[in-house]
Image (tube, rainbow, N blue to C red):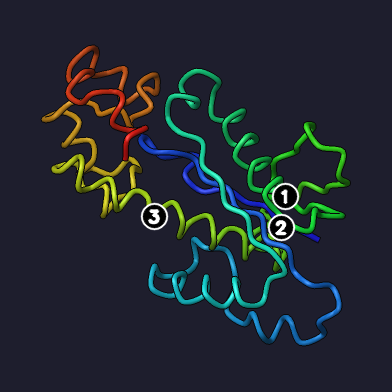
Amino acid sequence: MVGVDEAGRGAWAGPVAAAAVMLPADRPDLTRRLAGVRDSKMLTPRRRETLVEVIQREAMAVGVAFVGPEVIVEQGIAAATRQAMMDAIDSLLPPPDYLLIDYVRLPQTDVPQRNVVRGDQKSLAIAAASIVAKVARDQVMARWEQDFPGYGFRQHKGYGTRAHRAALGHLGMTPLHRRNWRPMLALGEVGRDLYPRGLLEQT
């Protein structure tokens, strides 16, 4: 059984991340071993980072995948999220027998699945995936701080905070920004070419 969840769906900048976590079905003490694992939004960043290590130790397999802002702009966030989830699932060895997915349905796979509304609050496997996806994406966004100083990516991770909005107004967009989303459309062409597009592929 594999839990699947995403992170970054609602951000203004950066990729959407997905994680797939395969938990053993024959471990009666698994809940105790994964004590504290719950919806990532209910945990502090430090607690999430600690729990990722526990999840990686206890899981049979963990897959993580990212889909970048260009795909999000061209195909939409729903399609990008499904692609990231499929990429994370496809990276698992052994392949999964059953998928528990937070809210999303994946018609691209023949693996039996169940999409669970608020699954990160109801399923241990989905909660584990939510933590892995969140930590992985946060780490990526923190690294972008070096290439795009002044935007505060290390703090807000690309989400729509007041500081992020102020930085956009002052500095314009970067290639990380989802340029057809409403906050970026409000900028028009300002800052669209501040950074070379190839930078995302080079770093």
Q: Nearer the viewer, mark 1 or mark 3?
A: 3
Residue farthest along the left direction in this orientation: 170
Q: Can you identify the residue that label 2 sits on?
A: 3
> What residue is drawn where x is 37% and y is 50%?
140
Image coordinates for residue 101, horizontal then vertical, percent: 72, 50
Q: Is residue 127 above or below residue 46?
A: above
- Please state which amino acid type lies under the numbered disc 3: Asp
Q: Gap in Å between the C-alphas at discs 1 and 2?
A: 6 Å
Q: Gap in Å between the C-alphas at discs 1 and 3?
A: 21 Å
Q: Is residue 132 left or right of residue 102?
A: left
Classify 10 Å Cα crowding around label 2: few (below 14), some (14-19), many (20 and above). many
- Mark 2 element type: strand
Image coordinates for residue 24, horizontal then vertical, percent: 79, 72
> What residue is drawn where x is 19% and y is 48%?
146
Q: Is residue 75 left or right of residue 1?
A: left
Question: Image quadrant for the C terminus?
Answer: top left
Check contact, mark 1 vs mark 3: CB within 8 A: no
Check contact, mark 3 vs mark 2: CB within 8 A: no
Which label was assigned to residue 138?
Answer: 3
Image coordinates for residue 160, horizontal then vertical, percent: 33, 40
Q: Can you identify the residue that label 1 sits on?
A: 101
Question: Which numbered disc flags the more N-terminal residue, 1 or 3?
Answer: 1
> What residue is drawn where x is 60% and y is 30%?
78
Q: Is residue 65 above or below residue 129?
A: above
Q: Is residue 151 left or right of residue 158?
A: left
